[in-house]
Amino acid sequence: MIAVVAATALAADDGDLDRLRAAATACDRTAVSRAWADEQRRHGDFVIASLHDQASIVTDRAALTERRRLARTAGGIAGLAAQTADAADLDDRQRALDDQRRLDTMRQEAVTYFRQLYITQCNGRDR
């Protein structure tokens, strides 16, 4: 599932932000409005994909916890290596998702900044 979140997050490249900055600086209302709408769609897709991925991680962690509990109660160490590998995989997935969230938050901050820049410097201009 993380591949879906990563693909969604990476689909909108940083060139979009460069174009948004240029449009805001030039007071190009049409380009800023289009960029803002595109970003809202991209962010909505990201939020849904990351929510699904987080739910999958939570479910997999609960299953792993139960397997560990059963192994402890049974008194055996059967499958301990597999459980350790599964735990590492879950940690890797969580870190990757957290990284994507950080990037998304930074992107949202940049888009909001350029939108505010446009509103502040272009207020009252006819373009």
Image (cartoon, rainbow, N blue to C red):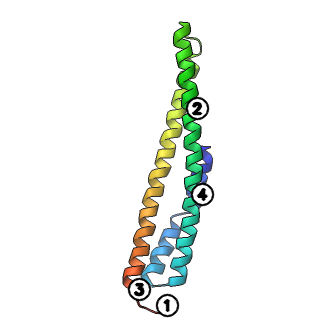
Q: Earlier in the sequence, mark 2 or mark 1?
A: 2
Image marks 3 and 2: residues in contact by CB distance under 8 Å: no
Residue identified by numbered label 2: 60
CA neighbours of label 4 inside 10 A, class few (<14), some (14 to 19), many (20+): some
Above or below 33: residue 77: above
Amino acid at pointer 2: Asp
Residue identified by numbered label 1: 127
Place of residue 18 in the rendered image (x, y in percent of width and height, measured from the top left): 48, 71
Asked whether residue 76 appears in the rendered view, the answer is no
Q: CA distance from mark 2 to mark 4?
A: 23 Å
Above or below 119: residue 60: above
Q: CA distance from mark 3 to mark 2?
A: 50 Å
Q: Residue furthest bottom?
A: 126
Is 109 on the left or on the right of 32, as rendered? left
Image marks 2 and 1: residues in contact by CB distance under 8 Å: no
Q: Earlier in the sequence, mark 3 or mark 2?
A: 2
Query: Circle 3 sits in a helix, a strand or a loop, which is it?
Result: helix
Q: Earlier in the sequence, mark 2 or mark 4?
A: 4
For the point 37% across and 81% down, which residue is it? 120
Q: CA distance from mark 1 to mark 3?
A: 9 Å
Place of residue 49 in the rendered image (x, y in percent of width and height, measured from the top left): 59, 50
Please name which of the two marks, 2 or 1, marks the residue nearer to the observer: 2
Image marks 1 and 3: residues in contact by CB distance under 8 Å: yes
Instruction: Locate the N terminus by quadrant.
Output: top right
Residue identified by numbered label 4: 45
Query: Circle 1 sits in a helix, a strand or a loop, which is it?
Result: loop
Q: Earlier in the sequence, mark 1 or mark 3?
A: 3
Q: CA distance from mark 4 to mark 3?
A: 30 Å
Amino acid at pointer 1: Arg
CA neighbours of label 1 inside 10 A, class few (<14), some (14 to 19), many (20+): few
Q: CA distance from mark 1 to mark 4?
A: 31 Å
